[in-house]
Image (cartoon, rainbow, N blue to C red):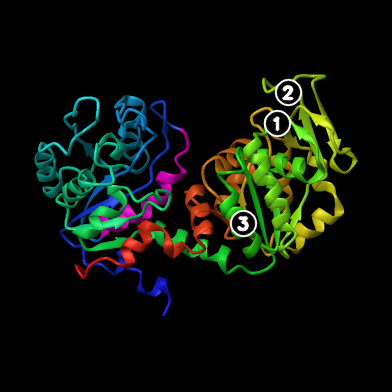
Amino acid sequence: MSEMDVLPKIQDADIFGKLVLIRVDHNVVKKGKISDSYRIDATIPTILHVLKKGAKPILMTHIGRPLDKQTGNININSNDDVLPIVDYLRQKYGLCFATIESQKCGEKGYFGIDTSINFIIKDLKAGLIDGIYLPNTRFFIGEEDKGELKSCFGKQLAGLADVFVNDAFGSWQPHASTVSPVDHLPSYAGLLMQKEIKHLTDIFHPQRPLTAVVAGAKFDTKIKPLKELLSVADNLILGGVIFNAYIAAKYDVKIKGISDEDMEIARDFVKLTEQHSCKVIEPLYIVESDTLEGKVEGQYRTHKISELKPGAKLNFVLDIDPKSFENEAIKEMVFKTNTFFVNAVMGLTPHFSEGTIGMYSLISQNKEALKLYGGGDTLQEFKNLLSDLYYKCVDDAQYYFFTGGGTILTAIEQGSPWKLDMIRALLNQKKII
């Protein structure tokens, strides 16, 4: 029996007439506006399932990073408020969610949920509203705490409802709102959570060959999942600064903007690649720029990597030249791939985007392969750069867009989706169900 078989699922729960606390990942508000509604839309099946079963939903999510980790102060402001999400749910889906205010604890944020929520819960039970949307969980002092405050906040959250559902795949951190209610309530995985786990297992048990495409601004933040991918994937394509560090280390050239720490890690990674059967596929051409201020005429140029001489000094390398993806060997590798995992923007957008467009377009030409795209910047740039293709892919069974790129890399680093704290909490919960 697999872990998926024993995972408690919302569709197996008796929730009729009950209050259901749902942790979602609606972290899509930037400067008071919704940047992309995909994460909200992805949770609608779970919300509608709860309503259809005669239960009452209470939603919660985190937004932004209001906690100053140096001072411990929490900046409560409208830029990180849930109100734009509440408005979106009403305007697009006709769902009426009420919100509440809480009392600040000095500069430390909200101490707990204000008792005025009891009046709103009465309205919810009476059917006057469809649900309640709690304030940004990161406005509460206990959310990111690791001790008694976390425990107290978790109990407060659990005290609002009869059942807990985690549908927040993108929120992998073991914060109070993602793991603590499990200690007090019958707890289940939402429909989105189940779907994300299923597709995550497609990376660990793929139809081969598996080609992974990973980019990032710093090598040290990606090195652990990259090491795991050398064991999991058949082909690996790097992008962004981590690719710059890789080629600088492999070909003994200097590229502006790479830290000494990243160079050291890159040298070790180059040696590590020689010990694995996974092939690191190197795009053939890079784009050098004299400035980070944009694509200024006369201040950028293309280099063929194989023609770089040891000791050569380059300014900022900000993109892969798209003619790299016209190479027959790379095209053959792409067309032979049966599973893609893509968590990468190849260049420094918005000015250097041709490499990303070239790579996404080439992958799309492989009609048979399963294409798994990580969340965050990857999806945003796909949507921005290739909007027509993106909207076609949303309804294409051969594509899947994860809602949390960081969660995927964390699972890869740990070697299994079942080691993620929020999933492990559901599997190991006390016999409350």
Dot 3 or dot 1, earlier in sequence: 3
**Any part of residue 41 in sight:** yes
Against 40, residue 78 (above or below) is above
Dot 3, crowdedness within 10 Å: few (<14), some or many (≥20)? Answer: some
Name the image quarter holding the C terminus: bottom left
Image side of residue 156 versus residue 27, left or right:
left
Dot 1, crowdedness within 10 Å: few (<14), some or many (≥20)? Answer: many
Pointer 2 and pointer 3: residues touching (CB < 8 Å)?
no
Name the image quarter holding the N terminus: bottom left
Dot 2 or dot 3, earlier in sequence: 3
Pointer 1 and pointer 2: residues touching (CB < 8 Å)?
yes
Give the CA separation, mark 1 to mark 2: 7 Å
Disc 3 residue type?
Lys
Dot 2, crowdedness within 10 Å: few (<14), some or many (≥20)? Answer: some
Which of discs 3 and 1 lies nearer the camera? The answer is 3
Residue 40 within the magenta-colored segment of the rendering = yes
Disc 2 residue type?
Lys
Q: Nearer the viewer, residue 365 or 406?
A: 406
Residue that carries the numbered disc 3 in the rendered image? 227
Residues shaded magenta: 35-52
Mark number displayed over residue 352: 1
Residue at 64% of width from left, 44% of height from top?
215
Mark number displayed over residue 295: 2
Residue 84, quarter of picture? top left
Q: Identify the secondary structure beneath mark 2.
A: loop
Against 346, residue 413 (above or below) is below
